[in-house]
Image (spheres, coloured by chain):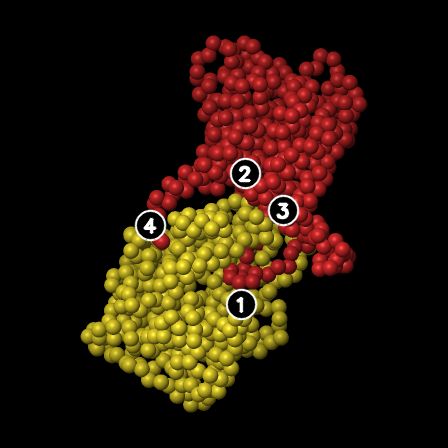
Amino acid sequence: MEFLRAFFDSQRKHFTGDGKLERWYPFYEAIETVFFSVDTVSQNGPHVRDSLDVKRFMTLVILALLPLLFFGIYNAGYQAHRLTGQSLAFTDVIIAGLWIVLPIVLVCYLVGFFWEVVFAVVRKESISEGLFVTCMLFPLTLPPTIPLWQAALGISFGIVIGKEVFGGTGRNFLNPALTGRAFLFFAYPAQMTGDAVWVAAEAIGAPLIDGFSGATPLAISSLTEAYGSIHAGLAEGGHGFLTLLLGRYPGSIGATSSLLCIIGGAALVLMGIASYRIILGGVIGVLLTGWILTMIPADGAIPWMALNPFYHLVMGGFAFGIVYMATDPVSAPDMPGAKWIYGFLIGLLTVLIRVFNPAFVEGVMLAILFMNLFAPLLDHVEVKLALRKRVPNV
Amino acid sequence: MMPIHVKKGYDLKIEGKPSLDLVTCAKPARVAALPEKIPFIKPKLAVDTGDRVNVGSVLFFDKRNPLIRFLSPGGGAVEQIEFGPRRVIRKIVVALDDTEESESFLSISEKDLENTPREALVRAILIGGLWPLLRGLPFRDIANPEVAPPAIFVSLDATEPFQPEPEVYLAGKTDLFQYGIKVLRKLVKGRIHIAAPEGRLTGDEAIDASITHRYSGCYPAGDPGVILYHIKGSSAENRSWYIHGQDLLLLAQLLKTGMYPTERIIALAGDAAENRSHVKTRIGVPISHIIGDATEGDADIRPIVGGVFTGYTGDRDSFIGFYETALTLINRGDQREFLGFVRPGFWKNSYSRAFLSSFNRSDLKMDCSVHGDVRACVACGSCNRICPVDILPQLTFKAILADDVDDALSHGMLDCAECGLCTYVCPSKIELAGILKGAKMAYFKEQA
């Protein structure tokens, strides 16, 4: 620690005042404040300040994502080994998983950090910690087979177009990680959708075993033909409710385990980081919409409608999306009532997109981005209603 | 008696509460008036260095209204007049002599008070130099002597850490307090509201019987602006006045005795203070006189004059202002902490639940560190949750920065109690309270 302090003290001069690297001060500052907190003191009242800062705020989100990353590494390795008929021993699986997942995460962090530094230096602002959350969220939503250049392109789009062009963290109106994912989804559908992308067999250099389709639960549901047979179809594909909840099935890297999302979400809500209103609103939206759809007598044209609404919660990326993406405070509404409606409509739209628009098998990404756009309107309405009760003071 | 429950706000668990003992301080060598710390006035000097002044001689007055005068809190010679940037008058220091002669003012007995016309009373307070103790909402400027307010709030508030407790300064002063209330009744067009915390009695039945509102809730539940916000029926009440309990005693003493009162009870607190207690001393004493030699040469300690949320930064050589009744000593806290942002934080104070200190019920040591770097607002909503007058600071400060004053006003910008809690909680370390206060000040100047 003393050694580190001495190191930073000796390097500081290059980045301040007349130092050669003065323009790169944001970079120096970002690295230094990882190890040592700032020494700023309040200039005027209030003289004391809360211990919470954005760095800790964002770090807690990253900590809540780590279990998902670890499970994602395990699951990516496990699925690749299982479906290529290789050893399922824990260490073998983990090594394969690291081989598949780590490069994607590292590329996202390097490219994301690069853009953030560029914009911070040009704007002479500090590097905002929101970046590190975005760079963790983004790879977890990708299929494990994603080419690295696409991951780099996606995170670039998310950071630059989704965030920096609007002024950086805090001024964006869309969730940057989802913006990047949506870009890849529409630009490179071959690598983002379909049955073949969810198992990284190629990465470990082994052929898939015969007869494996690789279909995700969402794909199976879309393809089910007979009304009322959707649960059987899922179970046949190896996707019982428990499997879906625990998340050991082929899917995007970090978003398959709904159980870990529930645990992470609970931790974030308890620490006051994520809004329980958005999460509960989303869950209610899914359950209510799903339940109403099961009530509608259909002729079997859309077997999706018969799905038990609780399946919607654990399938695909809904749990991940509602816990980690929808609760991004910047792109979500500010007002408490608006948060309930925002969450509810995300749930509703997710189900509607899944059920009625099989072209987009995963609805939650589009639902959240769509509601991001409506967040300011929801706020506006609630603020106007709240101000009616106020005795004017002008 | 009406109960008021203030739902929002925050009680800071900060170490260093003063005891209820009242310690009498010896006579200081000098006292000072600080024109710089009086809000909104344009001070003009009435004395020069070397002039002899009595207790109650005019030191300076407000150029906009020369009737608003500020009198000398001590008798002796003007030792020093210090100017700051742009000729702002920082302080007028009076070296006290042994005899300290006093000016004499009109005294009004309790019997005569009933028959004194309002104008005469206003004039007596103006001449007696204590009119500035009456403050006007919403700007908290000095009350305008030419209008009669719709209501006057008497604040027995001690919710901010660490203010003198009413039971200490009111002890044995029942008559004076009642007399002061009678004076206020003559000044007001509407009603007098006397607000005290729920449950806690001042120890005096006569005073307790006169209390009109009992508030419960966290800091700043007892602030006059917050109470007004919670009982306001129409916008006519926005321009109410207020006066603090201890100031009301000064006012009463002036009118009753005809002598300019100089006594002040100050709460000396903070974890870096040694003898934490209530101190009976004078208006405008040097800080070093109160804290003594105990912390001499200790540059790591910040003396805060007037409460940890709303006070100003002093130093050993500066003085206590006209309005301030608290002195808090805490550490400056400019050390860099190793890996501070991932520590469990059992001893780190926070409004959020992001630290283990959520489970720590005890008072915690705090310093002046801001605990982080300035970032853009991430819309965490903490300020909206904590604001006692529901301004929605998170939205209002953006309206102010975008120069949309109308929008900020409709959000209730002028109701802002200037409590500083929004700045306190902000994880992005944005000076929300400073922005709101600055916008109010700019609006005031625009109106004037």
Identify the residue under disc 4.
A391
B226 relative to B31 in the view: left or right: left
Q: Is residue A275 above or below residue A190?
A: below
Q: Nearer the viewer, mark 1 or mark 2?
A: 2
Q: Which chain is yellow?
A: B
Rendered image quadrant of residue B251: bottom left
A370 relative to A15 in the view: left or right: left
On the image, the x and y values in percent for residue B41 come to 41, 69
Q: Amino acid at mark 1?
A: Thr
Q: Residue furthest bottom?
A: B99
Kindly indicate whether the residues beneath marks 1 and 2 are on one polypeptide chain.
no
The answer to whether residue A191 is seen in the rendering is yes
**Front residue (pair A180, A345):** A180
The answer to whether residue B182 is seen in the rendering is no
Identify the residue under disc 3.
A128
Residue shown at 62% from the left, 48% from the top: A55
Q: Earlier in the sequence, mark 3 or mark 4?
A: 3
Identify the residue under disc 2.
A173
Q: Residue furthest left?
A: B115
Tag 3 secondary structure:
loop
Q: Is residue A143 above or below residue A274?
A: above
On the image, the x and y values in percent for residue B302 come to 57, 68
Q: Amino acid at mark 4?
A: Val
Q: Is residue A14 above or below residue B135?
A: above
Q: What's the colour of chain A in the image?
A: red
Q: Which mark is residue B15?
A: none
Kindly indicate whether the residues beneath marks 3 and 4 are on one polypeptide chain.
yes
Identify the residue under disc 1.
B313
